[in-house]
Amino acid sequence: MKNRIKLVLAACCFTTASLSHAQGDIMAENEKTPYDSYVAPKDKAVKENLAKWQDYKFGVLIHMGLYSQLGICESWGLAPEDWVTRNGYDDYDSFASDYRGARFSLNPTNLDSEKWAKMFKNAGVKYLIFTSKHHDGFCMYDSKFTDFKITNPNLPNAKNKNPDVLKNVLDASRKEGLSVGIYFSKPDWTSQDFWWKYYPPKDRNPNYDIKAYPEKWQSFVKYTQNQLDELTTNYGKVDILWLDGGWVRPVSTVKENEGKKGRQNLDINMKLIAETARKKQPGLIVVDRWVPGEYEDYLTPERKVLEKPIPVPWESCVTLGTDWGWVPNANYKSGAEVIQLLTGIVAKGGNLLLGVGPDGKGDFEPKIQQTLAEVGKWLDINGDAIYATRPIAPYSEGNLYYTSKGEKTVYGIYLPTATEKEIPSQIVIKNNLKGKLNVTLLASKQKLNYKNVTGGISVTIPNSLKAELAKQGGVTIKVSAQ
């Protein structure tokens, strides 16, 4: 089983090119993220929490599940859709049986949640979101409403000291001062009330007419509500509820040009879910992804960076490798690439949610650890230009990106290309600051000379520093008015 299923590679997933520098493929994607239907939260506690979240700028999304044991592209192999490939398999049922059978071998004995939390904190991460269950329905926590979970006493992980993976990760992350969130898939491809065995699955949606079997659909709705209630009741302080599977939504939220005709009304009563959760988690940020309305507290463009700032909170979720979970021989971004990705997002007013995944034993590959350490080292020095900043025009020009704090401080972050041997001798930083300015290189706290030019200042980079600075992911110049 293991050898066969490992042949199902990342080809079944949407992939993105790795950044070579600030102007890489992902930075060039200008697909617009609609925000005209955004509804700002009215709850005071939610607004306060959302404001804090907007200052965090850098988070991680950890995908872990049966797919981690198998080293494949999350649970998408279960989706009976034309774009999915299952190399090594002649029939769908064999794949599905082998995939779900991976629960009998998944045993993350090396998982050290405290080590994880320290690694992320040292990387400069401010919030962490962990996958409680993906679309396959396999729970990485001790759900009372299913046996398809890692804490099932018949599975090997149940014999470990702390079998509830979600609880361990969230508890350790909070101890390190990280804000925490829970990823939850609304669709569930193992639930008999979503994919009924009476019919074969046809696509990612329920495989039966919910109007013909309303009691079955309502049973699934109740199951979903129950699981979300236990997640927001039994797992301590939760800051973010990150809901995936945006096709599970009321048909009223679907536009005519989005395939509304013939679509089933997959309403799980988000109003009740949000109200119930916030009674126990005041200020909870709810992110019902891609479902416009009052339960999408911030937008989540995936694998892309917006061309310009938008007037609503947003977070770009991007994988460190090619997939959200662990796959062998992945091509991971370097520390410099992540630094430049983060800078490009923050300059447009967004947050970066970086997707990483451990293997089935609970280990993160050395390359992942190396990249995170490099990002953390850079943020230790340059974090003032990232955290709690706001976008400021012109946002970016060529390889130069801008952020600001208050009315008296502007940061210019120059992103060297991969082939650049020296950074320029003069860097022009646009600004409207008045009076005498302090201009400082954050890497050394060294004051830099400058001269006034039209629309800003031209900063002189000492010749002795140009080559060394070109090796950095980003070079930050702080300009502040006295």
Image: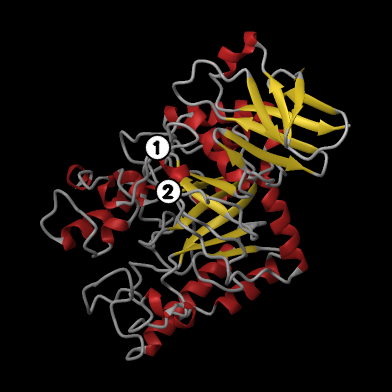
Instruction: Identify the residue shown where x is 44% and y is 78%.
Output: 255
Residue 320 spot, x, y in % from top left: 44, 39
Q: Is residue 240 left or right of residue 317?
A: right
Q: In the shown orientation, is residue 221 left or right of residue 84?
A: right
- Residue at 55 percent across and 76 percent down: it is 270
Residue, far top: 464
Label 2, secondary structure: give it.
Answer: loop
Left or right: residue 353 versus residue 70 is right
Give coordinates of residue 419: x percent, y percent.
44, 21
Is residue 439 visible in the rendered structure shown here?
yes
Q: Nearer the viewer, mark 2 or mark 1?
A: 1
Q: Residue 64 shows which numbered tag?
A: 2
Q: Tag 1's secondary structure?
A: loop
Is 110 or 88 nearer to us in this picture? Answer: 88
User: Could you say where residue 136 lies in the image, as x and y percent from the top left?
Assistant: 35, 61
Residue at which label 1 appears: 18
The quarter of the picture where residue 187 lies is bottom left
CA separation, marks 2 and 1?
22 Å
- Given residues 339 and 422, the one toward you in this image is 422
Q: Amino acid at mark 1?
A: Ser
